[in-house]
Structure formats: structure tokens, C-alpha cells
Image (tube, grey):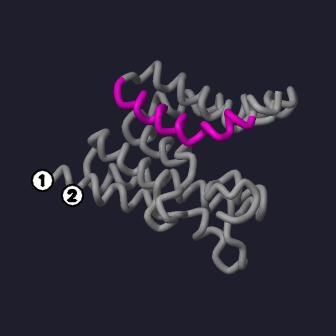
Amino acid sequence: MILAWKLILSFLIGSIPFAKVAMLGTGIDITKVGSKNPGFNNVLRVSSKWRAAIALVGDISKGFIALWLLSGEWLVGIASVIGHCWSPFLKFNGGKGVATTVGVLLFLEPRITLICLPLYPVLRFVGRKAGWEQEGAIASLSTMLLISILVGGYAYVLLAIVFIRHIPNLQAMRNSQ
């Protein structure tokens, strides 16, 4: 019974749409512009680095804080990522789950996560130079795959969630070739 409450609370913490919070006062609904994704990259695309940083830090923090407040159980972390991806505050829509997953992994596996995270910007840079259409999706999924291989277990569940949320990006990439 206690675990069920922890999962519900973690889901609700994960559901806080920090991309929408970051855009308060602009008159812009982040779910209706750019990629329509309520996440860091879309805020960066349609607004400012400062607002994008708010979205990124908020999304990473909610994964970390849910575990810190409620327990270090991996199921609690997964619940926060699910809340981010299917937020009741966004009519059960949400982001891709990457930043919230990073927060969960920083809590549960800080060393491995900090070692692997630099791969993400490197892949983004290489992808941009190589003209990859979906370099963000490729960088996110590649970094998550490496962490999953090193950590195992629950990290594969997080990878699966992030992969599911990136399917439209991957389909767009396939369709453009």
C-alpha cells in the first residue's frame, strides 16, 4: 500500500510540465508551437536559452527529487518518468522523458550517468555536422542505450519509455530518406 502511494506521488511530481512553467508570461503555449513537444529542445527552439534552462533543470530535478523525497526505489523513478511522458496536466500527453530519466539516473547511478552524459552533446554536434535530421533522438537514445548496457535492469525500462516517446521522430527520419 505504501509503495502504491509513492508511485502515485512520484507520477504526479513527474507530471509537472516545466516547459509550460518556463514559458509563463510569454503568451506562448509550448504544446502548440515548434515541435509541439513540452520539453527543453522545443523551448530552446521557440524561446530563449534562459527559459530552456528552466525547463531542463526542472525536468531533471523532478526525476531526482521524486526519488530523494519518496525513496530510492527504481519503480518510483520510473513512475516520475511516466508522469512526465503522460502528464494529466497536459491531457495525458507530455515530453520525451529524456531529462527526467537523467534525473532518475543521477540519483540511482550517479557515477555511470556522469561518465556517459558527455556522449549526448558530442553526438548532437556530430549529428548536426553530418546533417542527421533527428540528431537529438539519435543522441538521446544512443546515450540511454550505453547507460542501460552499463547499469542493466531498470535502466532498460527507462530506455524503452524514452524509445516509445521517440517513435514519431524515428518514423519521420525513416520517411525522409
Percent from the top left, x then y, of residue 127? 79, 30
Q: State the CA–CA distance, disc 1 to disc 2.
A: 7 Å
- Residue at image position (28%, 43%) is 72
Residue farthest left in this picture:
1
Percent from the top left, x then y, of residue 21? 58, 70
Residue 5's label in the rendered image is 2
* Segment colored magenta: 153-172
What's the residue type where badge 1 is placed? Met
Task: Tell me if residue 31 comes above or below residue 145 in the rendering.
Answer: below
Numbered disc 1: secondary structure: loop
- Residue at image position (74%, 63%) is 33
Residue farthest front in this picture:
175
Name the foreground residue: 89 vs 49.
89
The stretch drawn in magenta includes residue 87: no
Percent from the top left, x then y, of residue 108? 37, 37
Left or right of residue 126: residue 2:
left
Instruction: Report the residue marked by disc 1.
Output: 1
Percent from the top left, x then y, of residue 46? 78, 62
Numbered disc 2: secondary structure: helix
Name the foreground residue: 31 vs 79.
31
Disc 1 vs disc 2: Cβ atoms closer than 8 Å?
yes
